[in-house]
Image: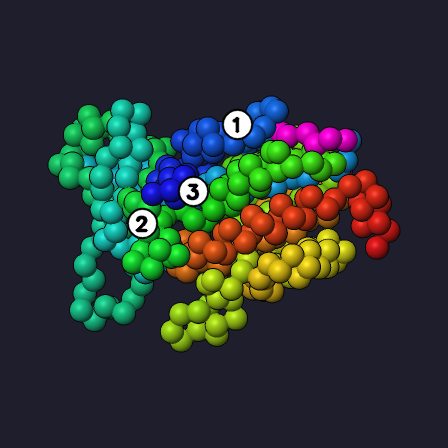
Amino acid sequence: MDQLLTMLKDLTDAPGVPGNERAARKVMENYISPYADRIAHDHLGSLIAKKKGNSDGPRIMIAGHLDEVGFMVTNITEKGFLRVEALGFWWMQNMMAHRVKVITRKKELTGILGFKFPDVRNLKKTVEIKDMFVDIGAESRQQAEAFGVRPGDSVVPDTEFSVLENPKYLAAKAWDNRIGCAAAIEVMKALHNQEHSNTVYGVGTIQEEVGSRGAKTSAAAISPDVMFAVDVTVADDVPGDRGFVKNGKGPAIILKDNYHIPHKGLRDFVIQVAEEEGIPYQLATLEDGGTDAGEAQFDGKGVPALSITVPTRYIHSHNSILHRDDFENTVKLVTACVARMDNDWLERLHAE
């Protein structure tokens, strides 16, 4: 694998559910540190890498979230099965009988998301999370505890990064949203030896999947003038869907979601840059959910913010697929935008 693929594998293979993003944060920190003047953390645990440009230009925050959807152990039954609660939104049919890892104090344990096989009259009924459990092969509560399990332990999908036969397509867990973290790293890398006027912050936020909590605290720590949330959006290019957003056709610029309508001047600027630089892009709306831009926009007097997303199939599941070109074009677009920003540009933006 080349260096980019190695980084993507390290980021996506690392566990990191909301509230326990430390392993993923460590990977991101290792990769982004060479391109930063300073590494810091907000008080909830978001990673903030700072790199100053050649003048006192705008503060630009480029954020991907470190957390992935997963589970938390809430109880151990007398027979050694683990009751869990979802951390983030899951489609129930994406869960049953999949392998997971239970992250204990001592080690990682392999488990299966188990369920009681339904009565034949109810085969079409979706099993709810309250009726599921993790089977780690323990025969009693005491044995499960001896394995190191306790309530509060994290549970993550047991899936490894893979390059598909068409090498442009990459499969992994946690594309939502380690791909945003990877973009922050690569933009910092691209700007490292490039002259620009701005102070750039590459940020890995925490707890996005449960309410964008890290976006709020990291924005408060930075006081950004502009914020880009780099995330994923659903690729609609599968059988039976509408085909509005497609893999391989460029990053999707989000026009609206449930929590955020982007600053029109910033949106128009990004589209203009994409067209002038010959970078393919798509336009999309999110009918449900949102990104870290929704919280970051409220910092101080308000922050012009925009979500730039990588089209991804099968998000919030054990296995998601994205196109390498979409990621690389996302990095090119954000880098080109930052390079054109300065104080005069920001003043014009505020006047719009």
Helix, strand, or loop for circle 2?
Answer: strand
- Local crowd size for mark 2, using a 10 Å CA cut-off: few (<14), some (14–19), many (≥20): some
Residue at image point 51% right, 51% down: 328
Q: Alpha carbon of mark 3 to alpha carbon of mark 1: how far?
A: 16 Å
Q: Which residue, given by chain and number where applicable, does mark 2 sit on?
A: 162
Say which of 125 and 255 sits in front.
255
Q: Would residue 238 appear left or right of 145 to someone viewing this image?
A: right
Label 1 neighbour load within 10 Å: few <14, some 14-19, many 20+: some
Q: What residue is shown at x 36% (from left), y 33% (from top)?
A: 152
**Tag shown at residue 349:** none
Asked if the residue under mark 3 is in contact with the one under mark 2, i.e. CB atoms within 8 Å, the reply is no
Which tag is nearer the camera, tag 3 or tag 1? 3
User: In what element is the residue under mark 1?
Assistant: helix
* Figure check: 205 above or below 132: above
* Dot 1 or dot 2, earlier in sequence: 1
- Tell me the element at label 3: helix
Q: Quadrant of residue 344?
A: top right
Q: Earlier in the sequence, mark 3 or mark 1?
A: 3
Residue 17's x, y, as percent?
A: 41, 39
The residue lying at 16 percent from left, 36 percent from top is 138
Decide which of tag 2 and tag 3 comes sooner along the chain.
3
Check disc 3 and report the residue beneath it.
4
Relative image position of residue 185 (x, y in whole percent): 53, 38
Residue 129 visible, this orientation: no
Which segment did they paint magenta? 50-55
The residue that label 1 is drawn on is 33
- Kind of residue at badge 3: Leu
- Amino acid type indicated by mark 2: Ser
